[in-house]
Structure formats: C-alpha cells, structure tokens
Image: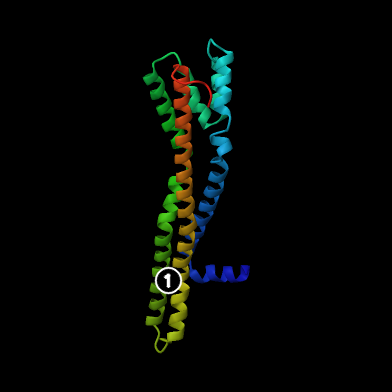
Amino acid sequence: MSTNLFSIVQAAGWPIWPLLLASMIAVALIGERFYSLRKSRVVPPGLLQRVLQEIRQNKNGIDEEALHELERHSPLGRVLAAGLRNRNASREVMKESIEETGRAVMHDLERYLTTLGTIASIAPLMGLFGTVVGMIEMFGSQGGAVGTHDPTVLAHGISTALYNTGFGILIAIPSMIFWRHFRALVESFVMDMEQQAIFLVEVLHGERGENV
C-alpha cells in the first residue's frame, strides 16, 4: 500500500508536493481546532452559576484577582469578567464592554479557520495546475519523438497527470466540511456566551432573578 502511494506521488511529479504540504497543514489545523473548540473549554457548564454565587457571597463585588482568574478560566469567563468590571455602570456601558470583549473572543475562536478555508478553496486549483503541468510535459515529450503517439501511452500519461486533480479534491472536501463545522460551532458558542452575559447584566441590574 505504501509502495503504491509512493509510486503515485512519484508519478504525479513535483506539483503534488505543495498539495502534500497543504494536506499536512489542514490535518494539523483540524486537530488543533478540535482540541481548542471543545465546549468544556470555551463555554464551561456551571460557570455562570458559580459567578452568581460569588456575587451573592460578596456584596461589595468581586475583587480584581478573582476577575483575572475568571478571565484566564475560559472565553466565557473573559466575557463575564468584562461585564463584572462595569457592574456599577449603566446597562448600556455593561453591554458595550461585553460586546467588545465578545468580538475579541470570537476573533480568537476563529483562529486558523481562514487558513483552513483557504486550503479548501485552493486545493482543487493546485491539483488542476499540477494536472496541466503534467499534460504539458507529457505532450511536449511525445511531440518531439516520431512514432511514439501510442494511445495506450497517452491514456496512461493523462491518468497519471490527473492524480494531482484527484488529490486536490481529496484535500478540499474534508477541509471544507471541517471549516463549515468549526464556523457553525464558533457561532453557537458566541450565541451561548451572549445569552449568558445578557442574563448576568439583567441580574446585576435587578431585572431578573438569579435562577438560570
């Protein structure tokens, strides 16, 4: 199996090496995003309840050290800490601070997704480029020789050149699937954080009870 794969890579020529590099980058990014975009890491369950309990126990407010710890805890912690820093301000000021932090958190959650989406978009083009290069080299070598226009040889050369296109599509399909999956995951996390942050604002301003 490994010998066949190596022979395919060797037959496809030098254009397949950028595709192999793109595939390794895509696999690395998918693995990293799977690890980083876990719900328990981004929106830990029970965090809002713990924050509300801390507020009940400390009527004078949460100290700065506790806020720093909350910020380091998770992306949701960063959003909630932004609201708590402005708990004595108006509702509008609290929401603005939460929205600003939320945009920064969303930017962090979308890290590497642009690269993954770019790989999904250009991999088929890179494969097509490799196929064109292979066919140009094949027809160039055939054109210089007399009596070598064997249809079998030409068919084999074309199939070999098409390895690049096939490999490019093979890279693009999973990359696109995971890119869309991670984008949807980030959007759901942001929506969840926004709802919890609004709940915190309403509790601090006495507009809602503390039962989540």
The relative height of residue 6 versus residue 40 in the rendered view (above or below) is below
Residue found 48% across the figure and 59% down from its top: 171
Question: What's under tag 1, amino acid-wise?
Answer: Gly
Q: Nearer the viewer, residue 199 or 136?
A: 199
Name the image quarter holding residue 141.
Answer: bottom left
Residue 122, how many percent across, how many down? 40, 56
Q: Nearer the viewer, residue 145 or 191?
A: 191
How many tags in the picture? 1
Q: Answer yes or no: is residue 110 visible.
A: no
Residue found 55% across the figure and 45% down from its top: 34
Residue 103, how many percent across, how many down? 41, 32
Q: Crowdedness of circle 1 by 10 Å Cα count: few (<14), some, many (20+)?
A: many
Along the horizontal axis of the image, is 38 left or right of 117? right
The residue furthest top is 60
Q: Nearer the viewer, residue 152 or 109?
A: 109
Q: Nearer the viewer, residue 186 or 64?
A: 186
Q: Answer yes or no: is residue 131 visible.
A: yes
The relative height of residue 79 versus residue 6 in the rendered view (above or below) is above
Residue at the spot of label 1: 134
Residue 72, how many percent across, how many down? 56, 27
Instruction: Look at the numbered disc 1 and give the secondary structure of its residue.
Output: helix
Residue found 47% across the figure and 40% down from its top: 188
Residue 195, how many percent across, how many down? 45, 31
Residue found 47% across the figure and 59% down from its top: 173
Name the image quarter holding residue 41.
Answer: top right
Quadrant of the drawing holding the N terminus? bottom right
Name the image quarter holding residue 124.
Answer: bottom left
The residue furthest bottom is 147
